[in-house]
């Protein structure tokens, strides 16, 4: 029998799965989705991988070299796990996970569809740059959005900024001299 506490958690997991699946149906630009950010920050990597596998099975995504793409997808939870206890590292590791996905997934494309030469490798990665730009934009938007909203901007709170105070006489004078029209 299901415990009362587990039921809401399973509903939450189902909503995550459905959200990830729906986000890949084309309402966002190609390669821009919350998938990378979810894989990076999620405590449920099985939902992340299951959504990828189910989407690829029923919507499309199984092709020569897709295992390289799956290896690239695995970079997100790996880097997320490595940086989980240090929010300062999360800001650096999320783009690193995105770059790792770019390198690994496009190596699979190179291996199966391009000549195995240096110019073939260069051509493959050059043609993939527009997709990487959207992947990185999606990862940063959704990933940093997750970090800012859910984690209450813990990275920003750890950055030391000079204290701005309005009690200094010169600041009070400058404020009082300013006319609001």
Image (tube, grey):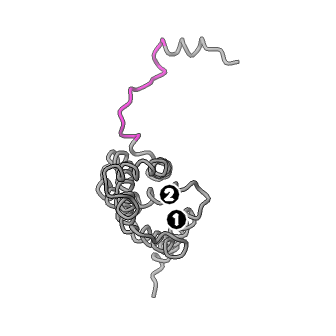
Residue 34 in view (yes/no): yes
Name the residue at the bottom extreme.
1
Callout 1: few (<14), some (14-19), or many (20+) C-alpha neighbours within 10 Å? many
**Residue 172 to residue 7: above or below:** above
Q: Is residue 139 magenta?
A: no
Label 1 close to label 2 by CB (< 8 Å): yes
Q: Which residue is mark 2?
A: 34
Location of the C terminus by quadrant is: top right
Give the secondary structure at mark 2.
loop
Give the secondary structure at mark 1.
helix
- The image position of residue 157, as x and y in percent, is 40, 40
Magenta part of the protein: which range? 156-170
Position of 172 with respect to 151 (left or right) is right
Q: Which residue is mark 1?
A: 20
Callout 2: few (<14), some (14-19), or many (20+) C-alpha neighbours within 10 Å? many
Along the line of sight, which residue is nearer the eye, 82 or 120? 120
Q: CA distance from mark 1 to mark 2?
A: 7 Å
Residue 76 in view (yes/no): no
Position of 129 with respect to 116 (left or right) is right
- The image position of residue 89, as x and y in percent, is 32, 47
Q: Is residue 161 magenta?
A: yes
Query: Which residue is depicted at the point 47% across and 19% down?
Result: 167
State the image quarter where residue 176 is shown.
top right
């Amino acid at each position: 029998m299901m415990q009362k506490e587990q039921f809401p958690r399973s509903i939450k997991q189902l909503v995550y799965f459905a959200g990830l699946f729906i986000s890949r149906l084309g309402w966002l630009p190609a390669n821009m989705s919350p998938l990378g950010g979810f894989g990076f920050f999620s405590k449920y990597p099985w939902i992340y991988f299951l959504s990828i596998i189910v989407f690829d099975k029923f919507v499309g995504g199984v092709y020569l070299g897709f295992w390289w793409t799956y290896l690239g997808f695995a970079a997100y939870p790996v880097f997320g796990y490595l940086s989980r206890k240090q929010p300062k590292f999360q800001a650096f590791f999320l783009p690193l996970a995105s770059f790792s996905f770019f390198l690994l997934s496009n190596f699979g494309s190179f291996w199966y569809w391009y000549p195995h030469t240096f110019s073939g490798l260069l051509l493959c990665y050059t043609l993939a740059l527009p997709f990487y730009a959207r992947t990185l934009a999606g990862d940063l938007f959704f990933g940093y959005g997750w970090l800012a909203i859910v984690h209450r901007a813990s990275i920003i709170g750890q950055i030391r900024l000079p204290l701005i105070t309005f009690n200094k006489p010169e600041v009070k004078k400058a404020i009082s001299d300013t006319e609001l029209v």
